[in-house]
Amino acid sequence: MAAVSPLQWLLHQRIERARELLETTTLPMDQVARASGLGTADSMRQHIQRRLGLTPSAYRASFSRLTAAPVAAATV
């Protein structure tokens, strides 16, 4: 296994946290970026796109673990 610099390790952890938040929340992109330590939505987009090949929005659309709320039955 190749040695990883502390900065690279930290960036990996931040991207993993952003992925988790994108999969499990509906937080706006700015909030996901701040909560994961990636700063701004623009910074997060650059890092995630470079690492995963997807924008954060595309990642969320593809990998969200949120289930749609059931549609209430229409009353007659």
Image: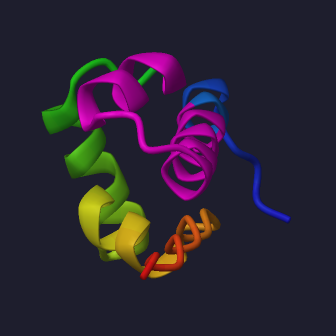
Q: Which of 75 and 4 is in front in this view?
A: 75
Q: Is residue 59 above or below residue 19?
A: below
Residue 12: percent from left, percent from top: 60, 44
Residue span colored magenta: 11-36
Residue 71: percent from left, percent from top: 50, 74
Task: Answer left or right for 19 relative to 2.
Answer: left
- Quadrant location of the C terminus in the rendered image: bottom left
Task: Answer left or right for 32 relative to 12.
Answer: left
Q: Is residue 2 above or below residue 18?
A: below
The secondary structure that most of the magenta stretch takes on is helix
Query: Which residue shows up at 32% across the image and 48% down it?
Result: 47
- Quadrant location of the N terminus in the rendered image: bottom right
Query: Which residue shows up at 39% across the image and 17% down it?
Result: 34
Residue 38: percent from left, percent from top: 38, 26
Q: In this view, does 9 lie above or below 57?
A: above
Task: Answer left or right for 1 relative to 49.
Answer: right
Q: Nearer the viewer, residue 22 or 6?
A: 22
Task: Answer left or right for 17 relative to 47.
Answer: right
As drawn, the residue found furthest toward the left would be: 42
Query: Which residue shows up at 49% across the image and 19% down it?
Result: 35
Q: Nearer the viewer, residue 57 or 49?
A: 57
Q: Toward which corner of the image does residue 8 lie, by quadrant?
A: top right
As drawn, the residue found furthest toward the right would be: 1
Query: Which residue shows up at 53% across the image and 44% down it?
Result: 25
Q: Does the magenta stretch include residue 12?
A: yes
Q: Is residue 19 magenta?
A: yes
Q: Which colour scheme is used?
A: rainbow
Label total for image: 0
